[in-house]
Every structure is written in C-alpha cells, then in structure tokens.
C-alpha cells in the first residue's frame, strides 16, 4: 500500500463512520436462530458497527474434509450488512476440527518431551505440518471465493493469536531447512552455537533437533534460533493465507491479532506484513500497575503501526476466566480502558465477545451481553460506551511520534530469560515498565519498538536520529548487535540523551558473551567497565554526592568508572565505592548508565534528570490521573473516586472521579 495510506481512516470514511468503530467477536454458530435474531437487534441498540465473525468456526463450516456448509454464514453476513455492521471475516485456522487430527495424527503438535497434544481444546496443530497447511489453504480458498465481494466484509482476520509451536519431526525438518537458509552449512551453525562446549558438535543438519527434553540445560543459541524459527514459521503460515486473500481481493485489508509483549512471536518482524495492526489486551483490575502496563503496550502497537490507527481486537467487558482469581472490571474501569486505547490510536474498540458463551471452556468469560441478558447494568454500560466511542472526536486524528524512544528487541528478551542465566530479577519486560513509570506518571508519551527502527532511521540519507527523538532508553538490552553502538554514539554526540539499564550488552546475536568488560562497546560508550554481575542476597545501601541515601535491590553490577562520573555508589559492604548510576557527557549529549535495580524514587530521579537535559519535564500528575495526547487533543483520565484538579495549558482542569475530559486543540 502507499506509504501515506491510512487503512482504518479510509475504511471509516467508506463505511460512513465518524467516530471509532465499536464491536466484538461474534460467534453466531454457537446459538439458535432466535438468539441470533435478538443479537442483531441488540447490536443496533449498543451502537455495534464492527464484528469479527467465525474465528472458531472451522468445524461448522467444514464438518467433513472438503464438504462445506455455508448457509448459516451467508445469512449472518447478509443480516449484519443490512444493519450497517462491518465484518472482519475470520479464516478460522486457529482451531482445526477433530477430523484433521483423526486423519492426520502427524498434524498434532508435540511438546519438548514428545507428548502429543490432542484435540479437545484449540491450537492443536503443528505449523510445519503439510496436512494442516493444505487444510488451512482449502478453507481459506473456499471463504475467499465465496465472500471476497460480499459488501459486509471489510477486513480479513487470519488465524487467532498466533503462537503455536511443535517439537516433532515435521518441525525438526523445517527447522533444519531454516538453518540451511540462515547459515549455509553445518560448520557455520557449529561456530554460531559454540558447540565445542559440552561436545555438542554436529556432523550434518540431520543431527539438528528442536529443543527437547534433555538431562540438563540446553544450548541457549539453539533455544534462541528455534524461537526465531518458530516466529518465522508462523509468519509463513500467515503470509500463505494472506496471499490467497490478496490474490483474489487485492484491495482487501488483512490482519491478525497480536498479544502485546508476547514471547513466541517477533511482532517487530511481522508488523510490515499486516495491513491493519490489531492487538488483544486484558487489563487486570486486581493489579495496581495494570494501567501502566496497558499504556506501554498500546504505545508498542502505535509504534509498530508506524503512526497509523490500529485495532483493539479483544478486551474484557468484565471478568476473564483464565486467572486464578478473576476480579471483574467495574463499568468505569471498562470505559476508561477503552478510552485509553482509543487515545493511543485504537480506532476500533472491540471485545471478546458479543454474547457470553453458554457452554465450553469460556463460559465464565464476560461479554457485552452477559448470561443474565440485555436488561443488566453491564449491557447498559457498554451501550452508553458504544454511543460515546462511535461519536468520538479523536477518531482519525494523527498519532504523531514521541520525543522518547524505548528499544524493545524481541530476541534480546528471549535470550535474557532462558535457563542458566544470572538472575530472573532482571526481567526485560519488568525493566521496560519501571523505566517507563516516570514518563507515564507525567503524561509523557513514548514510542517503543525494535532497534532496527533506529538503525533504519540512522541509515536514511540526510537523516539524523536526533531529529527523530531526544531520549533513547535501553532499559534491558541483554542482546546487543554491534552496529547499534555507533548509531547511539552519534545520537549522543548530536545532543541526544541515552539511558541504559542494567545487564545490557551481555551477549551477541548468537548468545555468545561480549568479552572484555565493555559490553560489546555499549559500556565503553557509557564510560564504565563491568567486571561481573552480582545478584544480591539483601539490598545494598547507596549514596550520592550530596550525601543522600538509598538502596539497590536484588541485582547490581560490579562497575568502575572510566570516563563517566558516578551519580550513586555503594556505601557499605564488599562493593563499597563501586558506582551504580553514572553520567557521561559526550558531545552535546550524554549517556546515563544504571548498573543495578534501583529503588523507584532514585530511578525516577535519574531518568527525570536525563529527560530534563533533553528539555522534557517529568512533573508527576495527581495520583490516579492519566494523561494522553493524540494529535492536538489531550485526554485526561481520572481513575480515582474523587474529583482531580490539574494545571494544563496554563489553566486549571477539573476531572470528575472515574471520568475523563477531552481537551481539543
């Protein structure tokens, strides 16, 4: 598509939608005709104008191999179109019918221990299985041939929450082929994986197997390459079916639903292949950090979408059914969750699902229409919300970019959390969140995405990374590619502020340790030398130059300054005098290094100083208040039960409790 093409805004205009789309997953195959008829009337009442249809309908559409029953779907699509409801039509390949496993047991996935996973749930397929892939192509071709020109169908939904994997024989062969393509020969694989350790050298590709149950730790390079392979294999599955759709309908919008920060798929590599990015996000009302997590996740989708609007494909109206203790959202929480996503660029606000299932594994998962029916507070609340969102003045507003860029490399995350590591305390996702907290609490938007985006920006002719942003944060860059260091150095010299978190620059792309104490050049750039990591049995006291005291908890690095100035240092014990947080001026900018898990207040102080050096003030908002800017508008959410007052644009703003205000340009 043209680079300036915004698919969702174009779709809104084509459908005559002035605000956001509002809707849900819809599963009419689970209900008798009289309930479906009622659903159609309730959709109008609830302002629903967008539904995803058929995500788990494979067995209903193809009850036997090659025999299709589509009359029910014909009627549903016709009825939805007659009521002005746009359809995201699913290619239902996430949940094969039992007959596929009966006829082709080799299509079923295997665990690391060789256990076959059977039908009776969902996701029971090996992405490498030839039988599965052929069956998926067949159902896709049928749907496209029948419905590509149906006026209700405005988008195609391939699969569902891709993340399936198998360790069986078909997966093993596909993995070998992937390695041949990546490395060329087995000697290159042996070198990359360091197989001289533990006598793991392989004679040929036939010696390669996926990660399987073994007596002790597996080679981390094998684990990481298999994770990369699995992501690529799933992308191949998606692209194969998307290609069938696009071949028959070149103008079709094709999507699949992401899951935020998800360990099994590299969304940074997928995003360019998805016409409209979509995400499933379920906040947890019992988690006090859930709003921050949601905000950072939405920032990730917005960044991956390149500034285009995106789809919140799934969320819960009330409770989910898969946590140990499923606390439901209040109506106010649900409303503010939806407006948060919309302010971050989601111009489709959708739910799982429209009507609560009467049976099956998700019978206790909430929906827009609960078991008790439409004459309930839950349905009344979502009806009011639908009216608000479909009239939203934010829809279609430009998203723009941020002055702050967080680096999140999927393979670095995967490499950091495997077995045999130094400490689980240094978790990359948790580090992203704690480094983001000062920005979130000040209402300062950030972008977050892969380092490849920075490398591409720096490589653009006539471009400067400093023109893209003022602050770059590497909260947890365990895996470091050497080419990034020079780009970051140039960024700092031109006036950028670079913030680096602990345990960064540890390994390269093959999970081989960066030697020499320089973190692959990253710590040398920061002006420190790292001797070793030091997980802590108890918190250590630290002190700054003004004599103020604090703590570093769970993990610290044994550092010494080379060209950096210490900001905080250990004040007692065997590491006394060792720097924990440092600052190095470089050109017109600076590098800030944090070599331990600092308590929140000190971390916020250091990050605030780095932001201030870039001209960004991180003054905290009132408690329970969240602020998001979209285009020229400012959205202020008050999650507290009492009114909040804040100063904004030179005037005082009052926000009622559990409510929001939208301030126009």
Image (tube, rainbow, N blue to C red):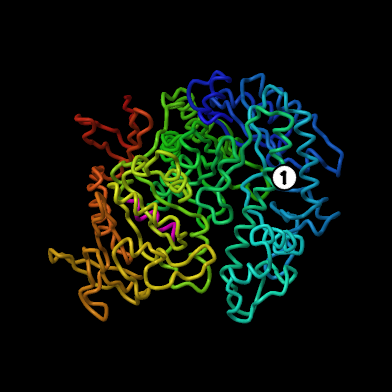
Q: Work out which quarter of the rendered image holds the N terminus and state it.
A: top right
**What residue appears at the point 61 percent right and 31 percent down from the top-left corner?**
51
Question: How far across and down, in percent of the image, does residue 300 sit?
Answer: 46, 45
- Foreground residue among 607 and 382: 607
Query: What secondary structure is found at the residue carrying circle 1?
Result: loop
Question: How far across and down, in percent of the image, does residue 665 sit?
Answer: 32, 24
**What residue appears at the point 64 percent right and 78 percent down from the top-left corner?**
200
Q: Is residue 84 left or right of residue 399?
A: right
- Foreground residue among 662 and 183: 183
Question: Vertical placement of 166 versus 87: above or below?
Answer: below
- Foreground residue among 488 and 613: 488
Q: Which of the 4 quarters of the picture holds residue 561?
A: bottom left
Q: Is residue 152 left or right of residue 654?
A: right
Question: How far across and down, in percent of the image, does residue 14 sit?
Answer: 58, 19
Q: Is residue 189 left or right of residue 432?
A: right
Question: Vertical placement of 18 versus 530: above or below?
Answer: above
Report the span colored magenta: 428-437
Q: Residue 435 magenta-drawn? A: yes
Does the magenta stretch mainly form a helix, a strand or a loop? helix
Q: Which residue is mark 1?
A: 93
**What residue appears at the point 31 percent right and 27 percent down from the top-left corner?**
663
- Foreground residue among 285 and 55: 55
Give the class, few, some or many, for how many residues have Cα within 10 Å of label 1's Cα (few <14, many ≥20). Answer: many
**What residue appears at the point 61 percent right and 20 percent down from the top-left corner?**
84
Q: Which of the 4 quarters of the picture holds residue 477?
A: bottom left
């Amino acid at each position: 598509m043209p680079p300036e093409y915004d698919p969702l805004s174009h779709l809104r205009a084509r459908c005559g939608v002035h605000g956001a789309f509002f809707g849900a997953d819809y599963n009419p195959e689970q209900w008798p005709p009289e309930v479906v008829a009622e659903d159609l009337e309730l959709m109008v009442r609830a302002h629903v104008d967008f539904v995803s249809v058929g995500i788990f309908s494979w067995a209903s559409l193809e009850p036997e191999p090659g025999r299709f029953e589509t009359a029910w779907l014909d009627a549903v699509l016709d009825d939805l179109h007659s009521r002005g409801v746009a359809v995201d039509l699913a290619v239902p390949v996430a949940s094969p019918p039992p007959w596929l496993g009966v006829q082709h047991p080799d299509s079923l996935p295997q665990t690391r221990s060789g256990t076959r996973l059977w039908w009776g749930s969902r996701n029971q397929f090996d992405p490498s299985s030839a039988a599965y892939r052929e069956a998926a192509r067949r159902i896709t071709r049928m749907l496209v041939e029948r419905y590509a020109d149906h006026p209700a169908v405005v988008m195609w939904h391939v699969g569902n929450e891709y993340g399936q994997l198998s360790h069986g024989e078909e997966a093993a062969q596909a993995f070998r082929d992937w390695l041949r393509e990546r490395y060329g020969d087995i000697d290159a694989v042996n070198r990359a994986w360091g197989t001289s350790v533990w006598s793991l050298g392989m004679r040929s590709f036939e010696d390669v197997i996926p990660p399987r149950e073994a007596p002790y730790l597996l080679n981390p390079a094998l684990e990481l390459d298999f994770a990369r392979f699995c992501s690529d294999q799933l992308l191949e599955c998606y692209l194969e079916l998307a290609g069938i759709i696009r071949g028959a309908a070149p103008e079709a919008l094709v999507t699949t639903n992401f899951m935020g920060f998800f360990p099994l798929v590299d969304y940074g590599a997928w995003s360019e292949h998805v016409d409209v990015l979509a995400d499933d996000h379920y906040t947890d009302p019992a988690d006090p950090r859930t709003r921050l997590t949601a905000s950072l996740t939405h920032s990730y989708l917005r960044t991956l979408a390149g500034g285009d609007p995106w789809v919140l494909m799934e969320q819960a109206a009330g409770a989910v059914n898969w946590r140990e203790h499923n606390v439901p959202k209040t109506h106010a929480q649900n409303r503010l969750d939806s407006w948060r996503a919309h302010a971050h660029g989601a111009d489709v606000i959708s739910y799982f699902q429209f009507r609560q299932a009467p049976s099956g594994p998700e019978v206790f998962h909430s929906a827009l229409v609960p078991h008790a029916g439409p004459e309930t507070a839950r349905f009344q609340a979502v009806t009011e919300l639908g009216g608000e969102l479909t009239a939203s003045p934010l829809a279609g507003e430009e998203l723009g970019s941020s002055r702050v860029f967080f680096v999140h490399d999927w393979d670095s995350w995967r490499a950091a959390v495997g077995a045999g590591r130094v400490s689980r305390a240094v978790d990359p996702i948790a580090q992203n969140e704690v480094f983001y907290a000062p920005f979130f609490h000040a209402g300062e938007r950030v972008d977050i995405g892969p380092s490849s985006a920075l490398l591409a920006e720096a490589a653009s002719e006539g471009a400067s990374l400093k023109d893209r942003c003022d602050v770059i944060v590497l909260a947890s860059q365990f895996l470091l590619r050497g080419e990034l260091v020079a780009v970051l150095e140039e960024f700092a010299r031109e006036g950028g502020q670079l913030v680096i978190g602990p345990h960064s620059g540890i390994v390269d792309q093959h999970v081989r340790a960066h030697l020499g104490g320089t973190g692959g050049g990253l710590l040398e750039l920061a002006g420190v030398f790292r001797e070793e990591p030091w997980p802590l049995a108890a918190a250590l006291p630290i002190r700054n130059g003004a004599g103020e005291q604090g703590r570093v908890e769970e993990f610290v690095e044994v550092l010494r300054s080379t060209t950096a100035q210490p900001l905080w240092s250990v004040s007692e014990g065997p590491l006394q005098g060792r720097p924990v947080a440092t600052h190095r001026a470089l050109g017109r900018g600076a590098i800030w290094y944090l070599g331990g898990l600092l308590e929140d207040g000190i971390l916020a102080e250091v990050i605030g100083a780095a932001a201030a050096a870039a001209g960004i003030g991180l003054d905290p908002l009132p408690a329970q208040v969240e602020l998001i800017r979209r285009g020229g508008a400012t959205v202020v959410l008050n999650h507290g039960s009492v009114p909040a007052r804040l100063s904004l644009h030179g005037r005082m703003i009052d926000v009622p409790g559990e409510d929001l205000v939208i301030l126009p340009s």
